[in-house]
Image: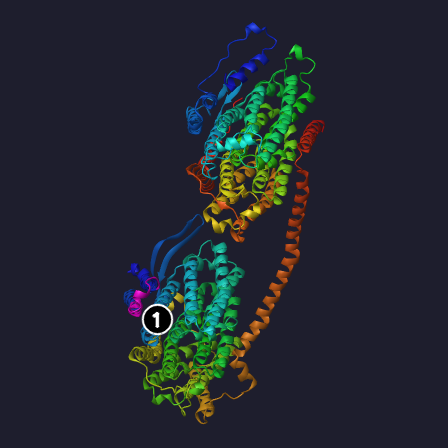
Amino acid sequence: MENLIALLIGAPLLGAAVLLLGGRRLDKAGHWIGTLLAAVSFVIGLALFADMLGRSADDRALYQRLYTWIPVEGFQADIAFQLDQLSMTFVLLISGVGTLIHVYSIGYMEHDERRRRFFGYLNLFVAAMLLLVLADNYLLLYFGWEGVGLASYLLIGFWQHKPSAATAAKKAFLVNRVGDMGLSIAIMIMFTTFGTFAFGPVLGATGETSEGKLTAIGLMLLLAACGKSAQVPLQSWLGDAMEGPTPVSALIHAATMVTAGVYLIVRSADIFNAAPDAQLVVVVVGAVTLLFGAIVGCAKDDIKKALAGSTMSQIGYMILAAGLGPIGYVFAIMHLVTHGFFKAGLFLGAGSVMHGMNDEVDMRKYGGLRKYMPVTFVTFGLGYLAIIGFPGLSGFFSKDKIIEAAFAKGGTEGWILGSVTLLGAAITAYYMTRVMLMTFFGEKRWQPDAEGHEPHPHESPRSMTLPMILLAFGSVFAGGLFSIGDRFVKWLEPVTSFEHGHPPISAGAITSATVAVMVVGVGIAYLQYGRRPVPVVAPRGSLLTRAARRDLLQDDFNHAVFVRGGTHLTRSLVYVDHTLVDGVVNGTAASVGGLSGRLRKLQNGYARSYAVSMFGGTAVLIAATLLMRAV
Amino acid sequence: MTASAVASSVHSLWTTAAEPLDKIPAPHIEYVQLSPVLIVVGAAIVSVLVEAFVPRKARYHSQVFLSVVALVASFAAVVGLAAGGYGSTKAHIAAMGAIAVDGPALFLQGTILLASVVAIFTFAERRLDPADHGHRVDSFAAEAAAVPGSDHEKAAIKAGFTTTEVFPLALFAIAGMLVFPAANDLLTLFVALEVFSLPLYLLCAVARRKRLMSQEAAVKYFLLGAFSSAFLLFGIALLYGYAGSVSYDTVAKVVDGSISTVNPALADTMGNDALLLIGFAMVLTGLLFKVGAVPFHMWTPDVYQGAPTPVTGFMAAATKVAAFGALLRLLYVVLPGLTWDWRPVMWGVAIVTMLGGAIVAITQTDIKRLLAYSSIAHAGFLLAGVIAATPSGISSVLFYLGAYSFVTIGAFAVVTLVRDAGGEATHLSKWAGLGRRSPLVAAVFAVFLLAFAGIPLTSGFSGKFAVFKAAAEGGAGALVVVGVISSAIAAFFYIRVIVLMFFSEPKADGPTVAVPSALTTVTITAGVAVTLVLGLAPQYFLNLANQASVFVR
């Protein structure tokens, strides 16, 4: 069975190669090839899953070693894969949601002349993401990590004719580089500390390693996770990444790639368990991002950016849970999976709305769309209910567990974290209700565009609605399926280690509080957007609103601190380079040149002066030789 | 009588001067072991006869054929001797103590012969200049004896004369060069020096174009060469006075004290250290002149520039090999007991040579002068290897010489291709934008320049690395530092030429690149091939040089 692991990656990789190298002759069939190969990967994943379920819980991990990539004395890097329960979860999520989004893209990208290339990039992404989660060592993981970064860059900037898309792609790439630097440094520290990159030896040796080193590795891994998962302070790229085609936003910037940071932290659990300081920073980052993203999501009028804020916030939940240690790992992953379903569904719904509205993204120009797009409305609505944590739906189970775990952290810390997660739940309910009401309820507010085309909202084609329906099923049932009988906990426990958290107040009380704050959030949003007509032009808003519209000034902050600071630093370095370094270099060059010019004059062309030079030289030779003897 | 035979009989005459003349024994000569030299000398003599008796029209072809065959045969003889163990186990002194047959001698002879073959190809090139009065012409004057610009010269040109005498001259020079690094007594050394120097003076004078410059170069070279020979000869006399013998072996033994018998005829001078040291310094002058070390280098730029370019290439490569070979043997065989005396002096010479060559090259505007200064700097790098005074020093110098000679001949061969109405366009400003017009030629030249600069993957790097490594191991770390600094300075002007060729706008009246015949093409191709092979896979040749690095005493 383990020989199939490479095929998981191989199928989409083949697709990427065929589609990107195949040229125009594949334009007609390209999307089918891409979708088929993604589906092949999913089917292999299912087969491996079935096989895995057939074995006992402790014997489920599979390994496949293809070859030794770098065979040097003292430095060995294998191309080897590891498929355990954690990887399996991701494989199914990536290939499953990935396949659905391929299907969706067939309709969504129908009129794009570069559709073949788009599917090539999507396949490349799926392959790289699978490599990331299947690697059995950090170096190979890094390879996948960079691969998804590349695919993300290519897909955000897919509509490269739009300067905003090109800029957004560049921004995503640059911000991610900061995080990637963290990962590469972490790997280097690992190598110097453990002499290897493989998960087994590295994670097995954490007991004998100093806490300082583990903290350093942990913080660097966290930096990497922040970059890839858009966590504060490296969150600024995610909103702009919505410039990419909506299926990309759904697959890469909601369901899968942005959760790679969570995977990294959970995979490195042993390191974080042994480095409480790093763990604390993880929790703080998660908590801050959770609120940050939620607040941004409240103020955005662009439907995709509102959802992007939400994504950031939900990943904040996962990171927070991952930072809680063994009481949270499982729930981080569980929320990751349910979030993968409902957020992908929400994005596809948003894409469907845009598809019917001439690519309009401003929710203030929607309104009343439930009549025009019933399927979209229902699936989006189910996703909405799931994310706000409506009892019985996916998000309810997974988010509730995280809130419980946060309280279970204990002490003041537990109370603070618990309150933050509850507050986050309230805000989530608020902004999602706002999105829902502005889009599907109220009066229609759309207007003819600049060229006088009145939008004609319509339901999307079957290829788009089908994935939405399937994802809606996931949004509704996944949480219950996982939670009832603690199935998911039992499934992941052998890999991630699990402890039951004991919150200071009863679980029932926490659940009630969660539901209560959700109702409050929904209520406030209803009062603001359901009872009153939504103005087409955004009101000026409070100071906080305005700041949130500007992503809580994250770009201004980056600009003031990093861009300006960086510019000044560069300028001063350039100054030093020009005056000092170049001064020395040019000065040396000039003096050598001057010396050359002067020495050259000795070469005057007269044989007599040459002879004098020889005579003098011989005299010096003789004198020196005699002197040496005398000394 | 061959050159070596002359040398050996003079030698026996000298060493047995006290005996009555009728007791001179017949010399014992190992003809087989001396065959590389004998073949070339024989060919040179036949070549003179060809000049005398073969009709003018057939001379060129016969001479080229004869020269190439002789050189190849001689090289085959060298290889045969090396294969027969004469480079290692059977190494010994032949011709009654006059000539050493050992590893370094065979290695250097082989190098000289290979370099000479490709150099002869450039001598024979007749496609570069446009036909003159319907006759194909080469780089050499129609009639060297005719006064430049005279009616006599015009008539010679019209008649299609060429100086085919360059071939016998070159063969004699090569014969002298073959003996020079193998010479095992001071007189053979001197005779060999003269045998290869005199033809070179002449060769310098016979350029077809810029004849006055060529003749000026030849006169300067001759005057200064004679001056340096005088020093050498005077030094030999002093050393004889000190040791009572000109044999390397005997001098060495007297220096280290293992012979202390005093020849009564020389009782006043023998064992006088002042004679030894002064004599040594003067012999050194003669050799340093030939390798072009500062401050005995001043002839180099003028002669390199004035001489016909094929001759310059030949001279720059083969003379340097021969002269360094002789220098190595002198320092390692004759004066090992004097190491503590000569090392500091040579340090000084090496440093000023490396720096002087590199620094003055910066302001050069003529490509041939530039290469001349570059050759001075390279002499400095080679001296660093010589100073190492270790076996790896010897082998690194051997390797460097092999690598350097091919780069040099190749580079000068490229210079012959770049021409305008006045012949070769050697002013650097004319090379601007050459890379756009003739990318291939410019790229080839760039390879040679990179090799000169010692950039990795070229033979220049392998050679320089070997030499500096040997010097550092031999305790001359400071010298290596100076060497690296000089290399950095030198890299500037090599790279500048590359920049000029590839990144400057071509001039409207720029030179054209002549399409050479197969001869020059082979030379350049061989140069590039050796440069790259020695750069990419130097190990085999380093091993070869290593095996060849033991002098017979």
> Is residue A24 in the magenta section?
yes
Mark 1 crowd level (few <14, some 14–19, many ≥20, 10 Å Cα):
some
Residue A512 seen from this side: no
How far from the left and from the top, in percent, is residue A353? 37, 83
Pointer 1 indicates a residue of which chain?
A
- Residue A427 vertical position relative to residue B442 in the rendered view, above or below: below
Q: Is residue A398 left or right of residue A219?
A: left
Q: Quadrant of the C terminus of chain B?
A: top right
Depicted B79 relative to depicted A97: above or below: above
Residue B535 position in % (x across, y down): 47, 41
Foreground residue, B437 or A380?
B437
Q: Which residue is mark 1?
A: A115
State which quadrant residue A499 falls in.
bottom left
Describe the element under mark 1 as helix, strand or loop: helix
Looking at the rendering, which quadrant does residue A552 occupy?
bottom right
**Residue A107 on image: x %, y %:** 32, 76
Q: What type of secondary structure mainly makes up the magenta span? A: helix
| Residues drawn in magenta | A20-35
- In the image shown, does A343 or B41 lie closer to the viewer? B41
Along the line of sight, the residue nearer the viewer: A612 or B339? A612
Q: State yes or no: residue B142 in magenta.
A: no
Is residue B441 among the parts visible in the rendering?
Answer: yes
Looking at numbered disc 1 in the image, what kind of residue is underneath it?
A: Arg
Q: Residue B481: name its quadrant.
A: top right
Q: In the picture shown, does residue A381 fall above or below B488?
A: below
- Please provide percent x and percent y for residue B97: 53, 17
